[in-house]
Every structure is written in C-alpha cells, then in structure tokens.
Amino acid sequence: MSTARNFIFSGIKTKRYCNFSKKLTVFTSSGHYSVDKTGMALGLRLDNIIKVPCDDQKMRPDELEQLMIQSLERKQYYFFY
C-alpha cells in the first residue's frame, strides 16, 4: 500500500501532503484489521478504504462491480486493490 501511494502521489515525499479525497483503496470486508491501521499511518482517511462484502472469505464480484460504478460516478479512482 505504501509503494502504491508513493507511486501515485509522487510529491508526497517532498510536499508531505496530498489530497486523497478522490483516490480509493479496496479490500475485502473480511480483511485484516491492520488494513485500517496502515491506511491511517499512510495518511489515508478511513472513508477512502472501500470494503467489499464477502461470501465464504471470497470477494463478491457483483458487490465489487456496484461499488466501482458508484465510485466512478463520484469521480473517485482506485490506486490500490
């Protein structure tokens, strides 16, 4: 996640701040709790971490598709999934 953030927001090393409001990261809803902690440590807001519902520990493609459509309509784009 750190590498993806540094690649997409190349100025973060020198400017120390980037606007993450339109960049999202996607994980399964059953993902490890450290995903939220890592996001916060990297300066991402928790509302930029999208959690896709799962069945039997597998991401539901129908839910993922719906969340992606909603995000694109809001002009939000994924940088890590």
Image (cartoon, rainbow, N blue to C red):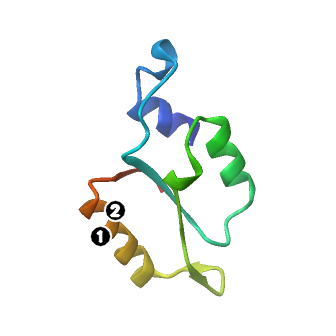
| Extreme-bottom residue of the structure | 56
> What residue is rendered at 39% in x and 34% in y?
8
* Disc 1 to disc 2: CB gap under 8 Å: yes
| Extreme-top residue of the structure | 14
Residue type, numbered disc 1: Ile
Q: Is residue 73 left or right of residue 56?
A: left
Q: In this view, does 13 lie above or below 80?
A: above
Using the rendered view, name the quadrant where residue 11 is placed: top left
> What residue is rendered at 59% in x and 51% in y?
46
**In x, y percent, where is residue 22?**
36, 46
Q: In this view, does 74 lie above or below 67?
A: above
> What residue is rendered at 50% in x and 52% in y?
48
Return the residue nearer the eye: 5 or 72: 72
Judging by the rendered image, the residue that carries numbered circle 1 is: 69
**In x, y percent, where is residue 37?**
71, 47
Q: In which quarter of the image is the N terminus?
A: top right
| Extreme-right residue of the structure | 33
Q: Distance between the residues labelled 1 and 2?
A: 5 Å
Judging by the rendered image, the residue that carries numbered circle 2 is: 71
* Mark 2 neighbour density, 10 Å: few (under 14) some (14–19) many (20 or more): some
Q: Helix, strand, or loop for circle 1?
A: helix
Q: In this view, does 81 lie above or below 3?
A: below
* Mark 1 neighbour density, 10 Å: few (under 14) some (14–19) many (20 or more): few
**In x, y percent, where is residue 19?**
41, 33
Q: Helix, strand, or loop for circle 2?
A: helix
The image's mark for residue 60 is none
Residue type, numbered disc 2: Ser
**In x, y percent, where is residue 30?**
67, 72
> What residue is rendered at 28% in x and 58% in y?
74
